[in-house]
Image: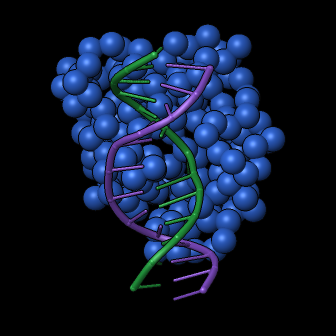
Chain colours: A blue, B green, C purple
Amino acid sequence: MSVARDLVGWYFSVDGVGGRIVETEAYRADDEASHCFRGMTARNAAMFGAPGHVYIYRSYGIHWCINFVCLPGSAVLIRALEPESGIDTMIERRGLSDLFHLCSGPGKLTQALGIDLSLNGCSLAAQPFELSPAATTGTVAADRRIGITKNIDPLWRFGLVGSRFVSRRFL
DNA sequence: CTTTGGATTGTCT
DNA sequence: GACAATCCAAAGA
């Protein structure tokens, strides 16, 4: 959980396209809302892999979502990014020039960065990824997670207070 | 083999 | 604010 909170503010990019992480959600093995709650399967295998790798899956048959694996069976969903590098590329991929809606959601983020299943299980330390610690700090708030139907009580969604780049603003 | 439902988004009212 | 779109893994028969 602490990893998810610490990750807010970090710089993340794929092939030079990326920005500052402003919203995350935590999922773990004993969490009913997590994909790995019922054990390892072909889809979520990456989630049980070595820490520092990514787990990518398709959501609602339409979108891609990306997670950072921090412990086997435990991962952090990257929900929103503040565009910083390669903004032109993002605009081209998203077909929209509104900065605030470029990466304000898991599916939007993956589309803007060009992430798909071919990157599932890849290491964050290797190409085309780039991840570096927070350059600036802000107030990080916790809230209930979004879009899930099970285990909705824990406050495992973290984000920058006041940021307009998140899917839903934090107070 | 068939059915079910989701860690969402975009569009319409 | 409400709802349809749309793919595939998991669960059931």
Front-most of residues A105 and A16: A105
Quarter where residue A12 is shown: top left
Report the quarter where the N terminus of chain A lies.
top right
Above or below residue C11? Residue A123 is above
Q: Position of residue A84 (x, y in %)?
A: 35, 19
Q: Position of residue A162 (x, y in %)?
A: 61, 10
Q: Position of residue A15 (x, y in %)?
A: 24, 39
Tell me the residue at 75%/62% (across/down).
Answer: A30
Front-most of residues A138 and A41: A41
Residue lying farthest right? Answer: A153
Above or below residue A27? Residue A164 is above
Left or right for A48, reference A55: right
Above or below residue A86? Residue C7 is below
Q: Position of residue A128 (x, y in %)?
A: 27, 46
Tell me the residue at 73%/29% (across/down).
Answer: A143
Quarter where residue A26 is shown: top right
Front-most of residues A58 and A143: A58
Front-most of residues A88 and A33: A33
Above or below residue A104? Residue A79 is below
Tell me the residue at 34%/30% (across/down).
Answer: A18
User: In the rendered image, is residue A42 in sight?
Assistant: yes
Left or right for A87, reference C1: left
